[in-house]
Image (cartoon, rainbow, N blue to C red):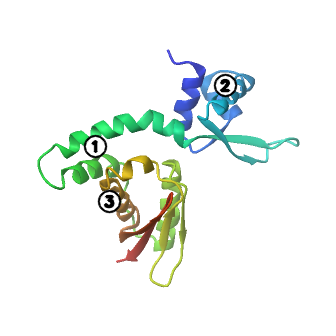
Amino acid sequence: MQTTREQILDYLSTHASASAAEMAAVLGVTAANVRHHLGLLQSQGLVALDSTRRGPRRGRPVKLYRLTPAAQQAYLEPLTRALLDALRSQKGENAPEQVLCEVFCREIAPADHRSLRERLQSAMHHLKTLHYEPRWEAHHDGPRVIFHRCPYAPLVEAYPELCRLDELMLERLLNAKVIRSERRGSLCEFVVHSR
């Protein structure tokens, strides 16, 4: 049986951010109990205050919490490295890329016939649920999609095929050719070439 802290971490791993009251309702405990555990998780560097929003009533704003990169890495990095190493051991030069695309892209419905702007807005919403912290900008040579945080940044140097996975995912979401243009620190930028 999971502890309350483990349940909070699991909940935040599938939600970009959440309030203590939202987590309390899902976990079946009091908001005060969740706030206590959030304080402990913050002191361990696993959870951070993300933002605040206006509450339903007058008074203090509602605090929203998110996982820190340290918490995300602690959960995912060892497993991801093992899986990627296993994929690399398969025969065929493109085996890791093909398997990764099958696993990650099968959940993504192909883009429909909406305008590119509407597809970009829909893609940003989808990518936020995956914790990419995305945005897009218009440019003279085509839109740019920018990820402010890559969920697997610590792995990219050893496994560059993960960047190709991002291109493939964006291509499926946007029904357009996408090319990664540059990486600036934790920012990744992709150029969208509409078909």
The span from disc 1 to disc 3 (Cα, nearest Å) is 14 Å
Circle 1: residue type: Leu
Asked if disc 2 and disc 1 are in contact, CB closer than 8 Å, the reply is no
Looking at marks 2 and 1 on the same chain, the residue that comes earlier in the sequence is marked by 2
Pointer 1 or 3: first along the chain: 1
Relative to 189, say whether 90 is above or below: above
User: Label for residue 37?
Assistant: 2
Q: On the image, which quarter does residue 8 sit in?
A: top right
Q: Which residue is mark 1?
A: 84
Viewer-closest of 36 and 7: 36
Identify the secondary structure beneath mark 2.
helix
- Choose the circle earlier in sequence order: 2 or 3: 2
Residue at far right of view: 58
Q: Quadrant of residue 191?
A: bottom left
- Residue 54: x and y in percent read 79, 47
Q: Residue at x 40, y 66 (%)?
A: 174
